[in-house]
Structure formats: C-alpha cells, structure tokens
C-alpha cells in the first residue's frame, strides 16, 4: 500500500469515527427526550451499526496481509 492511499484510508476512518460518535450523542439525547420519534431513532441506530461495520472494514485495510 502506498503512502497516499494509506493517508486517504486514515482520513476516511477519522470521518467515519466522527460520524459514529455524533450519532451516538444524538441517540443518547433523543432517548432522554420525553417524546421521541421511534422510527427516526431506529434509523439512527441502524446507521450507527452500519458505520461500525464500515469502520471495521476500513481498519482491516490498514493492517497488512500476513502470508502464512
């Protein structure tokens, strides 16, 4: 993997982590609200899970393959 590609992957990873963190905060705030939209909350939780999967995938691209 060349250095430019690695930098792009690291930038993408930072962006995904930031979005995941922001969603986590938004979900926490929504849950404590007296009247929250269950449908919107469900969609936010699904997006958060999808982000987690994408973060894992991007992290795996940074780890070099080990030839056994």
Image (cartoon, grey):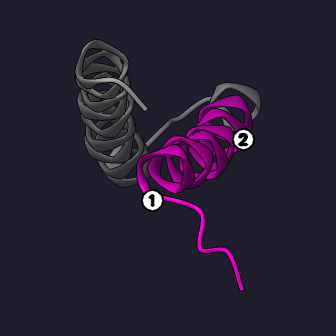
Image quarter where the C terminus lies is: bottom right
Q: Are marks 1 and 2 in contact (CB under 8 Å)?
A: no
- Mark 1 lies on a secondary structure that is loop
Could you say which is closer to the camera, residue 61 or residue 22? 61
Measuring 43% from the left and 32% from the top, which residue is drawn there?
1
Q: Name the residue under label 2.
A: 46
Pinpoint residue 28: horizontal percent, then vertical percent.
33, 51
Q: From the viewer's perspective, tell me whether residue 21 is left or right of residue 43.
A: left
Q: Residue 42 sits in which quadrant?
A: top right
The local crowd at label 1, few if under 14, some if 14 to 19, many if 20 or more residues have their Cα within 10 Å, is few
The local crowd at label 2, few if under 14, some if 14 to 19, many if 20 or more residues have their Cα within 10 Å, is few
Measuring 35% from the left and 47% from the top, which residue is drawn there?
24
Pinpoint residue 10: horizontal percent, then vertical percent.
27, 31
Of helix, strand and loop, which mostly describes the magenta segment? helix
Q: Is residue 37 above or below residue 34?
A: above
Q: Residue furthest front?
A: 68
Q: Residue 56 sits in which quadrant?
A: bottom right
Q: Residue 51 sits in which quadrant?
A: top right
Could you say which is closer to the camera, residue 28 or residue 58? 58
- Please say whether residue 54 is one of the residues in the magenta stretch: yes
Which of the two marks, 1 or 2, is nearer to us in this view? 1
Region of the chain picked out in magenta, as a range: 41-68
For marks 1 and 2, the one nearer the N-term is 2
- Please say whether residue 14 is one of the residues in the magenta stretch: no
Pinpoint residue 41: horizontal percent, then vertical percent.
62, 37
Measuring 27% from the left and 42% from the top, which residue is drawn there?
21
- The numbered mark at residue 63 is 1
């Amino acid at each position: 993997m060349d250095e430019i590609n690695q930098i792009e992957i690291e930038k993408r990873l930072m962006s995904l982590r930031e979005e995941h963190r922001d969603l986590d905060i938004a979900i926490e705030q929504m849950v404590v609200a007296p009247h929250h939209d269950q449908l919107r909350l469900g969609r936010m939780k699904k997006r958060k899970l999808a982000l987690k999967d994408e973060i894992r995938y991007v992290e795996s691209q940074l780890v070099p393959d080990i030839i056994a």
